[in-house]
Amino acid sequence: MLNLINDNKGFLSLIDSLLSIFLILMVLVSFNMVMDMETPSLSRESHQLKTSQDIMEIMSSKIDGRDYSILERISYTLSSNNNSISSRRDVKKLLDEFFASYFNGAYNYKDYHYSFIEINQLNGEVLSSNGDFNDYDEVSVSIRNYGNYSYKLYIFKE
């Protein structure tokens, strides 16, 4: 057998260097594999939440100082007519026009559906909707209050 203790030909040195090169290559390959792994983006997962919050914020904001927000107009229409059926129809028409501009218009929300509900005065009556949120797993909700009215906007994607 070989006399490894008195190795004058550098056999142990060669094995040691090959082993260290192999370990360095393994570290580089594993680092490269870790860097290529795809990690889910948190912004992609919360896009639906941001969408419902953004739309509800637009509904509660005034365009300029002279106009009323959508929520102010809805609340005024309902309260001035004592939540009558005709006032609910007027509110539905106003909401349908508003949501059509976002969900069917130039914005990139064509795959989304919505349901807009008043939960305080009308006991959860749907004022405007283009789908049933009970059929979907991922539903985003945003809530705004105006006067005695509390509104919920459900956003869900196909």
Image (cartoon, grey):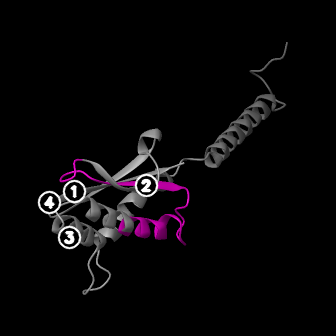
Foreground mark, 3 or 2? Answer: 3
Q: Secondary structure at mark 1?
A: strand
- Residue 150: mark in rendering: 1
- Residue 114: mark in rendering: 2
Of labels 3 and 2, earlier in sequence is: 3
**Residue contact between numbered discs 3 and 2, judged by CB atoms under 8 Å:** no
Q: CA distance from mark 4 to mark 2?
A: 23 Å
Q: Secondary structure at mark 4?
A: loop
Residue occupying image coordinates x 43% and y 69%: 97
Residue 148: x and y, percent? 14, 60
Write down the quadrant of residue 49 in the picture: bottom left
Of labels 1 and 2, earlier in sequence is: 2
Residue 109: x and y, percent? 52, 62
Image quarter in which the N terminus is found = top right
Residue 154: x and y, percent? 38, 52
Q: Magenta stretch? A: 94-123
Q: CA distance from mark 4 to mark 1?
A: 7 Å
Foreground mark, 4 or 3? Answer: 3
> Among all residues in the image, which is located at the extreme left?
148
Residue 151: x and y, percent? 26, 57
Nearer the observer, 13 or 82? 82
For badge 1, the amino acid type reads Ser
* Side (left or right) of 11 relative to 117: right
Residue occupying image coordinates x 35% and y 60%: 53
Residue occupying image coordinates x 42% and y 40%: 134
For badge 4, the amino acid type reads Asn
Q: CA distance from mark 3 to mark 2?
A: 22 Å
Q: Secondary structure at mark 3?
A: helix
> Dot 3 corresponds to which residue?
76
Q: CA distance from mark 3 to mark 1?
A: 13 Å
> Dot 4 corresponds to which residue?
148
Residue occupying image coordinates x 50% and y 64%: 103
